[in-house]
Image (spheres, coloured by chain):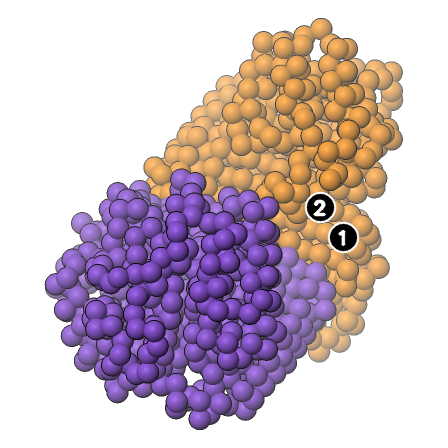
């Protein structure tokens, strides 16, 4: 992880508070501002999509027009003008890239600043990475090695061309186009994202990874990720997000769909570090994301781990539908909200199959004037006999101007299951702080140490590469919140 | 859409207002009753009232000649009777000195109405309908420094099919006074909308026990609001067992420092009953404690709902808020819902909630069976203990047996079918 350390230091020179707050000067190709049917057609045309997909998009667009933005979350923001956003923005690069050497050097420098030098990572970490820059996927590494195993890992726009059957079969199968307001919007205008297919009996030999970045002004990012794990497979997928510092709010409305067949395991980890806005809440990303995994197969397992430190507003509930008997759903989350950030995040565990199990561990940290809400649902349906859920949500408050809220829903339709929910809210205890200070740490270091201890249960679920980064991120996010 | 159906009840509530001379607050209230809450409203999502808009209902005109049917359960208790929603002084006991029972005049009724309207209960249908239709708002006042030793027993009964009843009671405990009140709901009406406002002044202390045991066809939508001043103590326990649909909603405002609140409850549901215990506790000032324990036992095709919200205001430091809800499902077709909610804006607090839903612990059954007790008996013992536990903790000693017997009647109904 030497490389990561170096780049972090480098980045610190670039920006002091939000280290990803730089803008890359790239010439971009944009669709006209605003949203109408022609824009949807334009995107579809740009991507040279087949007719069925265009129709699917148009259907979603019509559905979206008939829907209203949800207002039940504990977040407060001015109404979004959806006509003020660029729905397609692509860096003007060479038409086709054969190797990484052909990627716009300016772009490569961006990734270096992000702390993910492609070359370095290739060699050091052996992580296969897909980069999504504004609206298009830039490069995917390690394709060949993965292809040998039969694994497909490519931008979803490419999968539409090369594996249309798979995409057609699964897209929208977990999250239908009319699922919710932002999912409908995404279905209409999604521009790129990752596609992963793990064929039967293959354990993916490396961590798959995507970095998302919003670069253009006034542009939204609408990526769509689809991961399919066939019988007896394993895949671990990492996702990281950043955006430059801007005065306006930018919209990010992604959709992630996971499908796990018999005995398949999908581990999905996110480190979300979109620009949170400045101290007074000016600017920042609106992060409205729909993530859902479908455990179709018996003994399948889907595990969500998320570290949410960024975004002005987070509205995100990675969920599991446990259809297959003996399937397992997990949700591990750390949500840090500082300054004027607002986070409303949690999960849904829908138990349908017999002996299904789910675990929810959520750690919320609020500082400054931030509001942090855990919202979760555990539903045990009639046939889910022998099912089990355990939920623990803890909140930590730093300062007396912030808020921490817990809104769990439990709905149980069978006696043969057990649901347990626990939640606590407290502040960092004087004793802990005193103990640290006595040993020569300053208040900020002590807070960071205690907070990291508070989050440990979740952090240990993250893959190594991310855990180190995530720990630092939490420290950075809480800077200036004490003393 | 259910709620767009022309609702006759809304019209009959408006017409009912014309029976009364003092109209100011009644008009305001009836104007605010525009429809039944829709299932899209968060607090009514789990307890739906759509069916009420299809029922033929009219507000009751109390019959002051009606005889009472429910007798007192306690020797020497002071009885206050409401029949058809109206106070019946002729059927009530003579109250001890220092306590008074009055009907509020128009001005005070309006004040009382506004107190409800300033609370977060303001959109509850019972507030609007009962303020429109109640025969009168009755106020029970306990004088300063008075510790009432007699048990006050308030019995609500009367009503009939297709009629709605609207008892409204305002209880004020002045400084340093204390009282124990037991309320029993034994209506025969289709719809019951009781209102209760409790005001505890400095250092006042109230034990409240409510037993909901209305007719098997009734809808009871009870709305309660409590305001606690400095060092006051409110200890409330509700046992919900009757009615087809009973929802007891209580909002407690902790307005003075160092006050203490216990808001406990048990629901025992069988057949197709729907029982809902909804509470909201508002810690508005520092140094208060609140504790909540809720337990439910569900059989048949019944549904149980517990919604409990604890809100800690920005300056309410040193708050201690604890909440624990547990439900046991005994039948394949019973449904349990829980929504414990914390909303916290102050940092130096200790707040926690826990919720569990499940069947009887197999290990506990095994433990008893291994000691020669039959499975059926073992289950009975475990459930009985489950209830005794909370009753012993929430109810003062003298009344524990009574409450437990009340619970046992409903429990045997559930157990005989399920075990």
Q: Which of B274 and A432 is in front in this view?
A: B274
Output the chain of dot 1: B
| Coordinates of residue B35 in the picture (x, y in percent) | 69, 30
In the rendered image, the vertical position of residue A373 relative to residue A19, given as above or below: above
- Note whether A445 is above or below B165 in the view shown: below
- The C terminus of chain B: image quadrant: bottom right
Among the chains pictured, the one given orange colouring is B
Task: Please state if B314 lies on the left or on the right of B206 as rendered.
Answer: left
Give SS at disc 2: strand
Q: Mark 2 points at which residue?
A: B275
* Residue B303: percent from left, percent from top: 72, 52
Around disc 2, counting alpha carbons within 10 Å, would you say few (fewer than 14), some (14 to 19), or many (20 or more)?
many
- Using the image as rendered, state which of residue A8 and residue A51 is in the foreground: A51
Q: Residues within 10 Å of mark 1 (few under 14, many from 20)?
A: many
- Front residue of A414 and A81: A81
**Image colour assigned to chain A:** purple
Residue shown at 84% from the left, 59% from the top: B417
In the depicted structure, whether residue A384 falls above or below residue B320:
below
Q: Do callouts 1 and 2 mark residues in contact (Cβ within 8 Å)?
A: yes
Q: How far across and down, in percent of the image, does residue A241 sit?
A: 34, 64
Chain of the residue under label 2? B
On the image, the x and y values in percent for residue B364 come to: 66, 70
Residue B302 marker: 1
Sequence order check, earlier mark of 1 and 2: 2
């Amino acid at each position: 992880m030497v490389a990561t350390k170096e780049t972090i230091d480098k980045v610190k020179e670039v920006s002091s508070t939000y280290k990803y707050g730089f803008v890359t000067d790239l010439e971009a190709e944009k669709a006209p501002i605003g949203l109408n049917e022609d824009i949807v057609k334009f995107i579809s045309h740009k991507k040279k999509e087949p007719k069925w997909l265009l129709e699917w998009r148009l259907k979603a667009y019509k559905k979206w027009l008939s829907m209203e933005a949800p207002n039940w979350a504990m977040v407060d923001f001015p109404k979004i003008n959806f006509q003020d956003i660029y729905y397609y923005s692509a860096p003007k690069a060479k038409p086709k890239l054969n190797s990484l050497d052909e990627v716009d050097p300016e772009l490569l420098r961006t990734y270096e600043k992000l702390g993910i030098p492609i070359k370095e990572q290739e060699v050091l970490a052996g992580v296969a990475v897909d980069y999504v820059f504004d609206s298009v996927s830039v490069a995917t590494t390690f394709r060949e090695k993965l292809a040998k195993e039969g694994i497909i890992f490519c931008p979803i726009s490419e999968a539409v061309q090369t594996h249309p059957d798979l995409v057609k079969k699964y897209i929208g199968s977990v999250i239908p186009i009319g699922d919710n307001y932002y999912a409908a919007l995404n279905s209409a205008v999604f521009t790129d994202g990752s596609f992963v297919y793990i064929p039967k009996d293959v354990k993916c030999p490396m961590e798959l990874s995507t970095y998302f970045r919003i670069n253009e002004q006034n542009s939204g990012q609408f990526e769509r990720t689809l991961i399919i794990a066939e019988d007896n497979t394993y895949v671990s997928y990492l996702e990281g997000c950043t955006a430059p510092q801007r005065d306006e709010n930018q919209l990010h409305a992604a959709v992630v769909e996971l499908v796990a067949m018999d005995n398949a395991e999908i581990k999905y980890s996110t480190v979300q570090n979109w620009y949170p806005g400045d101290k007074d809440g000016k600017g920042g990303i609106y992060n409205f994301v729909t993530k859902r995994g479908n455990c179709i197969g018996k003994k399948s397992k889907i595990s969500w781990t998320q570290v949410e430190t960024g975004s002005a507003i987070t509205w995100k509930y990675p969920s599991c539908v446990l259809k297959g008997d003996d399937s397992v759903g997990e949700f591990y989350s750390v949500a840090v909200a500082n300054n004027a950030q607002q986070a409303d995040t949690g999960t849904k565990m829908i138990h349908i199959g017999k002996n299904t199990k789910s675990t929810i561990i959520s750690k919320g940290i609020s500082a400054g004037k931030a509001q942090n809400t855990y919202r979760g649902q555990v539903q045990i349906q009639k046939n889910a006999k022998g099912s089990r859920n355990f939920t623990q949500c803890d909140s930590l408050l730093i300062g007396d101007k912030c808020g921490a809220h817990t809104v769990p829903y439990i709905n149980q339709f069978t006696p043969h299951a057990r649901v347990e929910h626990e939640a606590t809210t407290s502040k960092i205890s004087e004793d802990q702080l005193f103990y640290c200070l006595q040993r020569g740490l300053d208040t900020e270091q002590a807070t960071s140490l205690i907070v990291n201890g508070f989050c440990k249960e979740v952090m240990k679920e993250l893959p190594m590469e991310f855990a180190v980064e995530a720990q630092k991120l939490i420290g950075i996010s809480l800077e200036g919140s004490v003393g | 859409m259910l709620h767009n159906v022309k609702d006759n009840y809304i019209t009959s509530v408006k017409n009912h207002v014309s029976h009364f001379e003092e109209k100011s607050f009644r008009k305001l209230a009836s104007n605010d009753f525009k429809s039944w809450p829709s299932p899209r409203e968060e607090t009514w999502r789990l307890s739906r009232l759509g069916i009420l808009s299809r029922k033929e209902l009219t507000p009751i005109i109390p019959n002051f000649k009606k005889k009472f049917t429910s007798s007192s359960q306690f020797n020497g208790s002071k009885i206050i009777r409401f029949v058809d929603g109206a106070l019946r002084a002729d059927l009530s006991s003579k109250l001890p000195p220092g306590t008074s029972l009055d009907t509020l005049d128009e001005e005070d009724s309006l004040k009382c109405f506004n107190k409800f309207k300033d609370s977060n209960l303001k959109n509850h249908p019972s507030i609007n309908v009962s303020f429109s239709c109640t025969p009168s708002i009755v106020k029970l006042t306990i004088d300063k420094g008075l510790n009432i030793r007699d048990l006050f027993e308030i019995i609500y009964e009367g009503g009939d099919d297709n009629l709605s009843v609207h008892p409204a009671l305002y209880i004020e405990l002045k400084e340093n006074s204390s009282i124990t009140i037991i309320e029993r709901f034994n209506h025969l009406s289709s719809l019951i909308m009781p209102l209760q406002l409790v005001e505890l002044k400095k250092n006042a202390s109230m034990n409240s026990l409510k037993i909901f045991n209305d007719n098997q066809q009734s809808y009871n939508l009870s709305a309660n609001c409590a305001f606690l001043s400095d060092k006051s103590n409110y200890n409330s326990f509700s046992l919900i067992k009757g009615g087809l649909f009973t929802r007891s909603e209580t909002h407690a405002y902790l307005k003075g420092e160092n006050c203490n609140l216990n808001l406990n409850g048990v629901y025992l549901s069988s057949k197709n009953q729907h029982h809902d215990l909804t509470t909201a506790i508002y810690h508005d000032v520092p140094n208060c404690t609140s504790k909540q324990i809720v337990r439910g036992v569900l059989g048949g095709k019944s549904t149980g709902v517990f919604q409990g919200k604890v809100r800690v205001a920005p300056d309410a430091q040193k708050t201690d808020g604890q909440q624990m809800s547990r439900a046991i499902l005994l039948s394949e077709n019973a449904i349990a819902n829980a929504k414990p909610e914390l909303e916290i804006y102050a940092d130096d607090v200790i707040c926690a909630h826990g919720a569990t839903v499940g069947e009887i612990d197999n290990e506990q059954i095994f433990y008893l069976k291994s000691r020669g007790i039959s499975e059926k008996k073992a289950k009975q013992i475990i459930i009985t203990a489950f209830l005794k536990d909370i009753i012993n903790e929430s109810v003062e000693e003298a009344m524990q047996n009574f409450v437990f017997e009340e619970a046992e009647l409903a429990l045997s109904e559930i157990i005989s079918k399920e075990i």
